[in-house]
Structure formats: structure tokens, C-alpha cells
Amino acid sequence: MLNLKTKCIIVDDEPIAIDVIRSHLQFFNDIEIVAECENAIKALEKINKNQVDLVFLDIEMPQVSGIDFLKNVNRDFKVIITTAYRDYAIEGYQLDVVDYLLKPISLERFIQAINKFFQQTKRNIVEFKQEVGLDPNLFIYVKEGKDTHKIYLKDILYLESLRDFLIIHLDNRTIEIRYKISDFEQKLPSDFFMRIHKSFIISIGKINSFNSNAIKIGSKELPIGRTYHEQVKRKLEIQ
């Protein structure tokens, strides 16, 4: 399964500098701090033990400088340099860093660096593993008032429970039926539909984006209920 979180390490011998980066990172739900290290040697230990995608790296540090670290480590991760010194900018870019941030680092400048990282790695594009699609010929009949409707499962976006009624949201219309959401859930293939809330079932193939609190289908953002959070997390590998 795809790991959606970007794993990062902050390497700086100044606690205040680490605090600033940590504070800026709170605006990015898809980036997780794996470790905070006061020198490059400790950073290398963490990198050898963990999956790391991005390193925020200071340059002037005791024992091993950030530049020496970059020159000698085998890298399968990206680096954003964070330093108070302009002198190393050319050398830093020659070592293929994503960006070179000068302290004090403003949030605006930090966001620019993160966007560069996303552009280089395309981690802002969620790619699900290839799966067998929902059979386009599968359908169900539902009764709305005096009318009975034939609904193809592939056209369902999500279902919404409203008291004693169930609203079926389709690509181009809605159908309201008197039905319990829990009973309707039993009729749907669990590989392609998922209960995310006491009031919502969604079609997994219709998801546009998601985070740990909500799922977006089209322009509608649907909440993930506390009771369903763990099963949604396992299904979509939200961390």
C-alpha cells in the first residue's frame, strides 16, 4: 500500500531553530516528524533506522557540518538546508538540495520550500494501487415513493442517512428512500464501499482527497466519525 505521509527529520544544534521548523510543519498534515537531532551523527543513526523522505539540515553544527554530511551520506531522501549563513548557498545547490532557507525562516518562505519538495517528488499526487474495478453492470433497484429506480453501483458517490431516510448521491442526481443506512450497507460490496460515519457510506473509487478527519468527494467534504476512524485508517492507510 502507498504510504501517504512524508517522513522528515530536523537536524539543528539550536533548539529554537527546531521549534520554528516544528511550528511551521503543523500546517502540513501530510508531513510527519520522525526525529529531531542536534547533530549530523545522530541524524545518520535515525536515517539508518527509519524511512526518511526529507531532511531539514543546518550547516554550522559541532562534530560534522551539514555540508560534510551531504558529501558523505548515501542519499535516497531530499534535503532542505536551514542556516543563518549565505556563504554555502552555491555549494548547497551543487549538492542537489531542494532549497536553501536563511534564518529566521518565515512561514511564507518555508511553504515555498515545501512546495518545491512536493513538485520534485510529486508527493502531492495520491496514487492508489491498481485494483480490479467495480463491475459497471452491477445495479440495484430502490423505491422512491411510487417509483422504482435502477441504480448502477458505479454511479454512486456516497449515501447520507437523514433520520429515517437515506439519500443516495449519484453523479447527476439524488434519490431519497426510506431505508436504514446499516441495512443498505449490507447490500454494497465492501471492496468498493466504506462506512466512514454513522451517517455516511462512500464509494472508495470516487474519493478526490482525504486526511485524518475528512474525505472529499467532488465538492463535498464528509467527516470521518470517531467510531469508524480506525477502519478508515486501515483501508486508506491514513496516518
Image: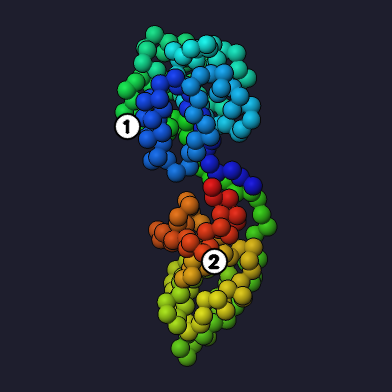
x then y, percent, for residue 236: 57, 53
Taking the image as drawn, is residue 39 in sight? yes
In terms of image quadrants, where is residue 100?
top left
Query: Crowding near pointer 1: few (<14 within 10 Å), some, many (20+)?
Result: few
x then y, percent, for residue 97: 49, 20
Q: Residue 29, which numbered label?
A: none
Give amino acid for label 2.
Arg
Q: How many marks?
A: 2
Residue visible at 57% across and 79% down in the picture: 183
Furthest residue toward bottom: 146
Alpha-carbon span between mark 2 and mark 1? 38 Å
Between discs 2 and 1, the one toward the N terminus:
1
Does 199 sit left or right of 141 as displayed? left
Furthest residue toward right: 132
Give amino acid for label 1.
Glu
Mark 2 falls on what kind of element?
strand
Query: Crowding near pointer 2: few (<14 within 10 Å), some, many (20+)?
Result: many
Does 85 sit left or right of 2 as displayed? left
x then y, percent, for residue 88: 43, 10
User: Is residue 169 placed above or below 70 in the rendered structure?
Assistant: below
In terms of image quadrants, where is residue 19?
top left
Would you name the residue on which mark 2 appears? Answer: 195
Furthest residue toward top: 87
Q: How is the image coloured?
A: rainbow
CB contact under 8 Å: marks 2 and 1:
no
User: Is residue 65 placed above or below 54 in the rendered structure?
Assistant: above
Mark 1 falls on what kind of element?
helix
In terms of image quadrants, where is residue 139?
bottom right
User: Is residue 110 placed above or below 168 in the rendered structure?
Assistant: above
Instruction: Please name whichever residue, 118 or 138, is drawn nearer the observer in this view of the structure.
Output: 118
